[in-house]
Image: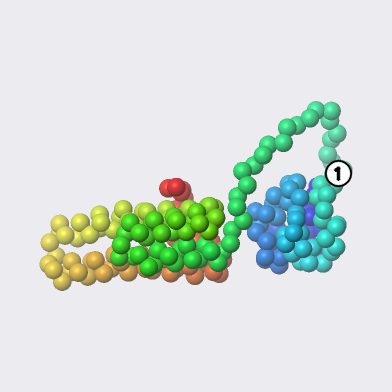
């Protein structure tokens, strides 16, 4: 059992509650509890949230009474490290699509370039770009369906405006959800990139 888990359980906190209190992601807490050594800001924030000394969280694995001792050496599987999510940069990546709502290829390319330049190659940034890709594919389809129905020039203009407003709404609603809950409101069950 890790020292972090022991300290967390002693304070009767769930991983989510510790995450809120320390401002450290639940995923990071899970990694530390499974054996990753906390360092720097993460170590300080967790120690402060648990009201304990930083040194008591180092050397994170302590033997559990139920653990069996074996002579077998188990190779450590390296998990692909997810980059730390900077939610301020994620909001910038999301809102950058807003500037290019009327120029559909740029509402994908600009966030994609920002994702790489800001080094935010995480699932949230990929999800933002995936949502814009789906919207970019669906918008012309909806527009063409509207034209085939021959509604007239006034209604065609209204359809175009509604398509653009739908993307603006998606971007702003996701920005609000990222700000409040650190996740997207409109998201896909898969990433396109």
Within 10 angstroms of label 1, few (less than 14), some, or many (20 or more) residues?
A: few
Residue at the spot 19% in from the left edge and 60% down from the top edge: 146
Residue 8 vertical position relative to residue 177 in the rendered view, above or below: above
Residue at the spot 44% in from the left edge and 55% down from the top edge: 112
Q: Position of residue 5 (x, y in %)?
A: 78, 54
The quadrant where residue 71 appears: top right
Q: Nearer the viewer, residue 89 or 63?
A: 89
Q: Nearer the viewer, residue 178 or 129?
A: 129
Q: Position of residue 92 (x, y in %)?
A: 49, 66
Secondary structure of the residue carrying numbered label 1: loop
The quadrant where residue 54 appears: bottom right
Q: Position of residue 145 (x, y in %)?
A: 20, 56
Residue 34 lies left or right of residue 109; in this view the side is right
Q: Nearer the viewer, residue 43 or 32?
A: 43
Residue 120 vertical position relative to residue 164 in the rendered view, above or below: above
User: Farthest residue toward the front?
Assistant: 117
Residue at the spot 73% in from the left edge and 32% down from the top edge: 75
Residue 98 vertical position relative to residue 108 in the rendered view, above or below: below
Residue 75 visible in rendering:
yes
Residue 156 lies left or right of residue 178; in this view the side is left
Residue 132 visible in rendering:
no
Q: Which residue is mark 1?
A: 63
Residue at the spot 54% in from the left edge and 53% down from the top edge: 122
Residue 48 lies left or right of residue 179; in this view the side is right
Here the colouring is rainbow
User: How many discs mark residues in the rendered view?
Assistant: 1
């Amino acid at each position: 059992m890790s020292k972090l888990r022991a300290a967390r359980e002693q304070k009767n906190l769930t991983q989510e509650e510790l995450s809120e209190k320390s401002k450290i992601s639940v995923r990071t807490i899970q990694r530390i509890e499974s054996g990753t050594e906390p360092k720097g800001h993460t170590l300080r924030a967790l120690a402060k949230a648990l009201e304990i000394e930083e040194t008591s969280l180092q050397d994170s694995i302590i033997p559990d009474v139920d653990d069996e001792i074996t002579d077998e050496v188990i190779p450590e599987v390296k998990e692909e490290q997810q980059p730390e999510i900077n939610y301020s940069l994620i909001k910038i990546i999301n809102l950058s699509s807003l500037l290019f709502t009327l120029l559909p290829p740029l509402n994908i390319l600009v966030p994609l370039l920002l994702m790489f330049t800001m080094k935010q190659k995480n699932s949230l940034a990929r999800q933002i770009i995936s949502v814009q890709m789906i919207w970019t594919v669906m918008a012309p389809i909806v527009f063409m369906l509207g034209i085939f129905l021959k509604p007239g020039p006034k209604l065609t203009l209204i359809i175009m405006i509604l398509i653009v407003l739908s993307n603006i709404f998606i971007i702003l609603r996701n920005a609000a959800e990222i700000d409040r809950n650190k996740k997207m409101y409109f998201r896909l069950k898969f990433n396109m990139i």
